[in-house]
Image (cartoon, rainbow, N blue to C red):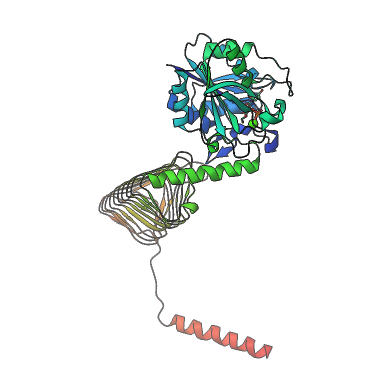
């Protein structure tokens, strides 16, 4: 069965107190919208339509960053969830398969749940995702008769008896696309909010002799975000789930509560993460790598057996091959560090390539930026870069070459050569002793004047 996703994202999110459309607020470095879109990927949707309204340009740009093929339907006035879904109709003209409606501000729907919904569609014309709420609050209530779903009543329109029910509507609904749009045609706005409720399609379906059923999921999955404080809770919720998943997959985490993950962090089995490590977006850590405490990684790839930190910073394009070592107070950006190379202390490596087994001494800097352009530093294999070398790019250092400590290297160093680029040292016999005596006498005189 081919599937079309319809993601509702037109709402303003007034309670966010923000100029940014609600669905673009981020959880674990990705807009909420992307979380919903990613969950939908499990259904291998043939088409995806995002219904945008408030901040539609920004929502469109973000959706297209996720997937350029996503279609955008504009809902200029927010007249209700049924009206929102109706805006997706032209984009799905002639589409024969199932449609499934998700909310852009409900980022935690699990793939298993979406799969269960498509499964339930086999025996029901309309399937609604429900959950048993601990505190049902203002959610719509699902009115069932045995396994059958009879109708959905919105909180505002519900009787006290209906409000006492705890089975709530998550908002996720699925039906054959054609059927969904036909049912929506019959939805009116004669209700407490004066809105076109998508939820009304259940009663309409029943009146037409169609069947409706409920799939249940844990409440945590249907958590919506309406305020900054709910956004913060959602972030915390995401982190808890993501940490648990890594632990289940065989990652050792010394203090999981202090590890912060991004929506797309990938860490292999038997990798080790020490306390207080922050993952920005786009990080892959392979098996048996070790990320030591207080490190910060973003857009980086750490291969098997590599060690990073403590206190290391990997920025976008940092590519560490197997068995590399990146130590404390080292920053690496857009650079390939090849197998077995070591960059252990107080160093900046940017726009560079470091050959196999090469050792970079403490305090080395690739001077990659001239104020306008970025330049590349290339260092060969088995080289030794002396402490505090300034490599003024563009520059290259050959295989098995060396640089003397404190050198400013402005010219290419051939294979096997030693580059020394610093002033020659002079030692003046006895001068230090004389200087000390002079300075101490001066201090004693000042002290005598004070007393
Ligand atoms: C909706 C459901 C309610 C359910 C709850 C779950 C209806 C009528 N009610 O209520 O049964 O328990 O979600 O969270 O469907 N949106 C648009 N255009 C609109 C209106 C809404 O795009 O014209 C989008 C919003 O941006 C949001 C989603 O649809 O992502 C839900 O809208 P919202 O107004 O929050 O619905 P609720 O009143 O919470
Ligand atoms: Ca809502």
Q: Identify which residue, 202 or 198, lies in the foreground.
A: 202
Q: Quadrant of ligand 2?
A: top right
Tell me if residue 1 comes above or below residue 374 in the rendering.
above
Q: Position of residue 394 (x, y in %)?
A: 40, 45
Quarter of the picture holding the N terminus:
top left
Vertical arrangement, residue 198 with respect to residue 357, above or below: above
| Residue 156 placement (x, y as % from top left) | 72, 28
Q: Residue furthest front?
A: 146
Residue 268 visible in the shown view: yes
Q: Quadrant of residue 203?
A: top right
Location of residue 208 with respect to 258 vertically, above or below: above
The percent position of residue 120, horizontal first and vertical second, equals 46, 22
Q: Nearer the viewer, residue 37 or 125?
A: 125
User: Which residue sits at x=37%, y=47%?
Assistant: 395
Instruction: Please identify the residue farthest to the top as the structure is shown.
Output: 94
In the rendered image, the vertical position of residue 309 relative to residue 111, given as above or below: below
Residue in front for this viewpoint, 441 or 215: 215
Which is more toward the observer, 52 or 374? 52
Residue 280 visible, this orientation: no
Instruction: Please state the horizontal and vertical placement of residue 250, each as a whole percent of the image.
Output: 35, 47
Quadrant where the C terminus is found in the figure: bottom right
Give left or right: position of 302 versus 98.
Answer: left
Q: How many marks?
A: 0
Left of 285 or right of it: where is 16?
right
């Amino acid at each position: 069965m081919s599937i079309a996703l319809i993601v509702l994202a037109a709402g303003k999110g007034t309670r966010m107190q923000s100029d940014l459309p609600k669905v673009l607020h981020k959880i674990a470095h990705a807009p909420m919208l992307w979380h919903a879109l990613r969950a939908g990927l499990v259904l291998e949707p043939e088409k995806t339509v995002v219904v945008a309204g408030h901040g539609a340009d920004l929502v469109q740009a973000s959706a297209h960053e996720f997937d350029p093929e996503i279609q955008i339907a504009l809902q200029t006035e927010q007249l209700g969830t049924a009206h929102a879904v109706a805006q997706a109709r032209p984009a799905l003209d002639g589409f024969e398969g199932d449609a499934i409606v998700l909310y852009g501000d409900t980022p935690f729907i699990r793939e298993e749940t979406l799969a269960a919904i498509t499964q339930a569609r086999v025996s029901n014309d309309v399937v609604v995702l429900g959950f048993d709420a601990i505190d049902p609050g203002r959610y719509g209530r699902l009115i069932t008769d045995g396994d059958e779903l009879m109708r959905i009543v919105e909180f505002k329109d519900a009787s006290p008896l209906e409000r006492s029910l705890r089975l709530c509507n998550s908002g996720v609904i699925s039906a054959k696309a054609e059927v969904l749009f036909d049912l929506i045609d019959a939805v009116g706005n004669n209700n407490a909010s004066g809105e076109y409720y998508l939820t009304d399609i259940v009663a309409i379906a029943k009146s037409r002799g169609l069947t409706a059923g409920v799939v249940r999921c844990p409440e945590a999955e249907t958590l919506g975000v309406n305020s900054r404080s709910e956004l913060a809770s959602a972030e915390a919720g995401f982190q808890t789930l993501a940490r648990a998943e890594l632990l289940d997959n065989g990652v050792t985490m010394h203090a999981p509560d202090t590890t912060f993950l991004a929506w797309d962090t990938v860490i292999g089995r038997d990798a080790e993460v020490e306390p207080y490590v922050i993952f920005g977006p786009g990080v892959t850590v392979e098996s048996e790598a070790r990320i030591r405490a207080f490190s910060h990684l973003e857009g980086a790839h750490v291969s098997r057996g590599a060690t990073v930190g403590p206190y290391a910073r990997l920025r976008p394009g940092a590519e560490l091959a197997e068995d590399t070592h990146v130590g404390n107070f080292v920053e690496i950006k857009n650079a390939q560090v090849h197998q077995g190379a070591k960059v252990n202390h107080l160093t900046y490596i940017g726009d560079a390539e470091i050959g196999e087994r090469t050792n970079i001494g403490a305090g080395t800097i690739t001077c990659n930026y001239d104020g306008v352009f970025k330049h590349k530093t290339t260092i060969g294999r088995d080289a030794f870069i002396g402490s505090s070398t300034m490599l003024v790019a563009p520059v290259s250092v050959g295989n098995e070459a060396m640089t003397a400590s404190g050198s400013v290297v402005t010219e290419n160093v051939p294979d096997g050569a030693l580059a020394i680029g610093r002033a020659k040292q002079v030692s003046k016999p006895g001068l230090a002793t004389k200087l000390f005596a002079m300075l101490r006498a001066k201090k004693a005189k000042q002290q005598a004047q004070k007393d």
